[in-house]
Image (spheres, grey):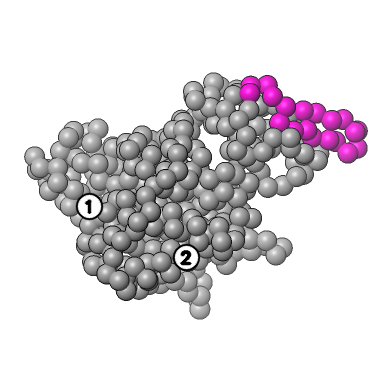
């Protein structure tokens, strides 16, 4: 195992932060799998899971069981980790710019531009390494203006040549679920069966260029322009490890074992006897996840919970205005799986409270009241 660090320049005199990468296996061994956690720095379940994964990889490495290259960034956002206010972590958005830490990563397809076409050969496998080299060169040519940009570029320099990229997050209260593109449904199913996801939300281009999209979307964009000469270069997914309070060693240890099962299934490890044993999860469109918003401000109580299958119009909970004593129902706009709810039990009118995943793209205005 080798450790690499990347020092961020520092926003002010006398300040420095570091990113740390752990590399297991031989350099440039295939497949390369990249995992990170804590990009939203108030989300700790994935951070704890990777601690247990690293313990397991230490053991696997000592037994010579690592075939590919496995890269772990245990804390992907040292900036966010240091940003607290009133004894609460901000975590999700940068305190200075208010930019979401998991948005606006470099667009690799745009960075390599039309010049890549002149370099492509008729052989997709040869083009795989050629395109990855072009990605690395384009990233190294960038000149980040802030620590946040430098952090995003640094993470992508480590991950842009990976065969598999897993970004570990969590929600407020939620069931285990994941986000992936439509490009590799077989790998999405394999991942669901390995980690026990209850739901896979599928989206190719959200426009926000989150970390997973920044790795999967460029290959699709280049293939749409240049055809079959461009291979399917990277499978990327965001794993949502339930809710923010689901931080327990026993649970994290199980989740780590499930990730080891996935690593073995894609050929990065040997000697792992467990096979993906969970049922495949429904693959539903992200655009079919209907938002439920508060009809009034007040105190929120739930009758339904993450993991429940709900019917359209079903009462999911109530909001009580403690001044007027008016009690209003919160209803499901569509039938589907209620997979997440917000953390707070106080709410304001128009605030997002929860989401229900449906099988069809939600029509405009599909908002539960």
Res 52 label: 2
Q: Quadrant of the N terminus?
A: bottom left
Q: Give the secondary structure at mark 1.
A: helix
In the image: residue 341, left or right of residue 297: left
Res 104 label: none
Q: Which residue is mark 1?
A: 132
In the image: residue 182, left or right of residue 300: left
In the image: residue 14, left or right of residue 69: right
Q: Residue at x 68, y 21 (%)?
A: 313
In the image: residue 348, left or right of residue 281: right
Is residue 70 in view from this perspective?
yes
What is the count of numbered marks? Answer: 2
Q: Is residue 9 above or below residue 234?
A: below
Q: Are marks 2 and 1 in contact (CB under 8 Å)?
A: no
Q: Residues within 10 Å of mark 1 (few under 14, many from 20)?
A: some
Q: CA distance from mark 2 to mark 1?
A: 30 Å
Q: Residue at x 30, y 61 (%)?
A: 271
Q: Residue most toward the bottom?
A: 14
Which region shows up in magenta? 311-329
- Residue 145 occupies which quadrant of the picture? bottom left
Q: Is residue 361 above or below residue 250?
A: above
Q: Residue 215: give x, y in percent of width and height.
A: 34, 47
Q: Is residue 3 above or below residue 248?
A: below
Q: Give the secondary structure at mark 2.
A: helix
In the depicted view, which residue is nearer to us: 238 or 352? Answer: 238
- Residue 95 occupies which quadrant of the picture? bottom right
Q: Residues within 10 Å of mark 2 (few under 14, many from 20)?
A: many
Q: Residue at x 81, y 39 (%)?
A: 298
Q: Is residue 57 above or below residue 98?
A: below
Which of pointers 2 and 1 lies earlier in the amino acid sequence?
Answer: 2
Residue 328 is a magenta residue: yes
Q: Residue at x 39, y 57 (%)?
A: 260
């Amino acid at each position: 195992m080798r450790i690499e660090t990347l020092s961020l320049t520092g926003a002010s005199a006398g300040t420095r932060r570091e990113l740390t990468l752990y590399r297991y296996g031989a350099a440039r061994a295939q497949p390369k799998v990249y995992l990170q956690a804590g990009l939203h720095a108030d989300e700790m379940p994935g951070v704890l899971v990777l601690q247990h994964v690293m313990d397991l990889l230490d053991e696997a490495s000592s037994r010579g069981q690592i075939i590919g290259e496995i890269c772990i960034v245990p804390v992907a956002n040292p900036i966010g980790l240091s940003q607290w206010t009133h004894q609460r972590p901000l975590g999700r958005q940068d305190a200075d710019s208010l930019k979401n830490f998991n948005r606006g990563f470099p667009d690799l397809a745009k960075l390599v531009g039309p010049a890549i076409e002149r370099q492509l050969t008729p052989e997709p496998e040869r083009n795989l390494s050629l395109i990855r080299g072009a990605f690395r060169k384009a990233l190294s040519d960038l000149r980040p203006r802030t620590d946040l940009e430098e952090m995003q570029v640094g993470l992508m320099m480590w991950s842009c040549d990976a065969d598999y990229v897993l970004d570990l997050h969590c929600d407020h209260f939620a069931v285990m679920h994941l986000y992936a593109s439509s490009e590799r449904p077989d790998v999405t199913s394999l991942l669901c069966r390995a980690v026990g996801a209850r739901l896979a939300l599928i989206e190719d281009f959200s426009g926000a260029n989150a970390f997973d999209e920044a790795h999967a979307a460029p290959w699709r964009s280049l293939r749409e322009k240049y055809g079959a000469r461009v291979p399917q270069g990277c499978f990327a997914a965001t794993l949502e490890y339930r809710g923010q309070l689901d931080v327990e060693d026993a649970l994290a240890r199980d989740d780590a074992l499930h990730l080891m099962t996935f690593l073995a299934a894609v050929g990065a490890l040997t000697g792992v006897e467990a096979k993906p044993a969970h049922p495949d999860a429904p693959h539903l469109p992200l655009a079919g996840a209907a938002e439920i918003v508060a009809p009034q401000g007040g105190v929120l109580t739930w009758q339904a919970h993450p993991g429940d299958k709900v019917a359209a119009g079903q009462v999911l909970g109530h909001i009580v205005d403690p001044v007027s004593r008016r009690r209003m129902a919160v209803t499901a706009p569509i039938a589907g799986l209620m997979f997440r709810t917000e953390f707070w039990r106080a709410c304001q009118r128009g605030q997002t409270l929860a989401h229900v995943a449906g099988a069809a793209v939600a029509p405009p205005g599909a908002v539960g009241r």
